[in-house]
Image: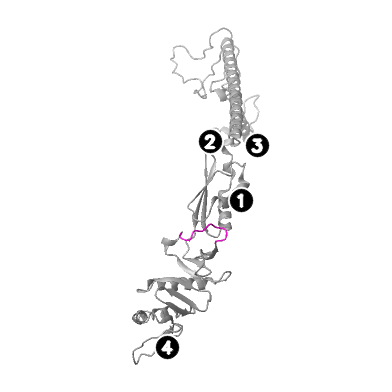
Amino acid sequence: MSSADRPEDLPLQAGAAAPDLTMDYWKKGAGADSAGDAGAEKQPSQSVFSARSGIQDPLVKTGGEPEEATSGEGFASTEPEGEETAPQAPAHKRRKQKGQPRVVKSRRQLDRARRRQMNYLQRRREQKKMRVFYNRIRLVFKLCFALLWMVLLWELMHSALWMYKPAQFKLENRQLLQNAQLAPLVQPLSGRPIYAIDTGKLARRIEERFDIVDRAVVRRRMFPARLDIQVMEKTPWAEVYADDKQAGPYGLLVPGGIISLVEYRYQPALYTNNGVEKVLAAPHTTFKLSYLDRLREIAWQARQLKGLSLLSVDVRNPQVVVLNFQEIPVILGRLDHNAAERLVRIVPLLPKIREFRDGIESVDLRWENQATFHQKPNAKLNLPQNEPMQG
């Protein structure tokens, strides 16, 4: 390639400046072009009104070119004559494309757009005012109804229908406990609303106050306001007498101990059908629970012996227990672990007891390997030979 064909070797024209081919020239040119493109892209495409309402705002420029002043009611057409224009998308979906001219609107269209904006904003203000007004009305109604309900509830809670009267309680499921005995516990509740009474606390007080009560249940009842008190009493297994001549018992033996009958109205035949034993004990005698459990077991075994009818159990001397059968008294002795075995030895002696019934006062089973017949005073027994009797 010759030097005449290379552009850098061609001679400069007259009046032309020498080109600057350094890197600074290209950097400056490239920076200017990029700044111009960035400035064109930063121009806003829609207003706040257009963003909220979804309507294209005609007051905002749709392109980066300056607005051209037009006169008249028509549009300035820049398209060449004889060419057909392609159908365009709606205004809110149309996008600016490079190389296409910007559509310029007339003043009349701009005024109409302003009026539409003002009408739209006015309607929005009126709708907002109506919503605020209706919300305030609803709030006022809610406050009125809430106040009305509070007044009604206050009057209902303090109505005379809910007030408890001490005489209005019903006692069920009891045999010894009487209404008059519960009156001191119920009297402090007078004048209180029925729903404010602690039924659980009242039930616990009844159980702690009366030993005969095994469990108490208190329930509220309305119209009229009252209390239903259900009492489950302990079932006794023996009645305690001071002696055989006493008219009635002074206590009851239950699985949990002994219960005094001083504060109860007791009828002697109240537990007759329940198989309650008769126990003779000295008043104010203290028994251990283990002793009472063994005594109950021995009394039950004595009741099961065939041919003998148990009348009472004498424990006035706790170390010498006597079983009073209808046929003959039996001295059992101490209630140790061998008491049940000693009691069984009475069964083989029943024929001899029936034979010498008139002359035998009692049978003694306190010894382990023998049974002793105690003879009545001034009584003569005709015993067969080789059959001595101890007594």
Is residue 357 found left or right of 177 in the rendered image? left
Mark 4 and mark 2 in contact? Answer it, CB < 8 Å: no
Residue 312 in the image: state x and y as whole percent. 45, 71
Q: Distance between the residues labelled 3 and 4?
A: 149 Å
**Circles 3 and 1 in contact, beta carbons < 8 Å:** no
In the structure shown, which secondary structural element does the residue marked by tag 2 occupy?
loop
Which residue is disc 1 drawn over? 184
The dot on residue 390 is 4
Residue type at the position of mark 1: Pro
Location of residue 86 in the rendering, given as x and y in whole percent from the top left corner:
44, 18
For this orientation, the residue located farthest to the front is: 378
Looking at the image, do the residues carrying marks 2 and 1 touch, with CB atoms under 8 Å apart?
no
**Residue range highlighted in magenta:** 261-269
The answer to whether residue 64 shows anywhere in this view is no
Amino acid identity at mark 3: Asp
Q: Residue, x 46% and y 11% (percent of image)? A: 81
* Disc on the earlier residue, 4 or 2: 2
SS at mark 3 in the image: helix
Q: How far apart are marks 1 and 4 (CA)?
A: 62 Å
Type of amino acid at the residue the image marks with label 2:
Ser
N-terminal-most mark, 1 or 4: 1
**Residue marked by disc 2:** 2
Q: Residue 255 carries which label?
A: none
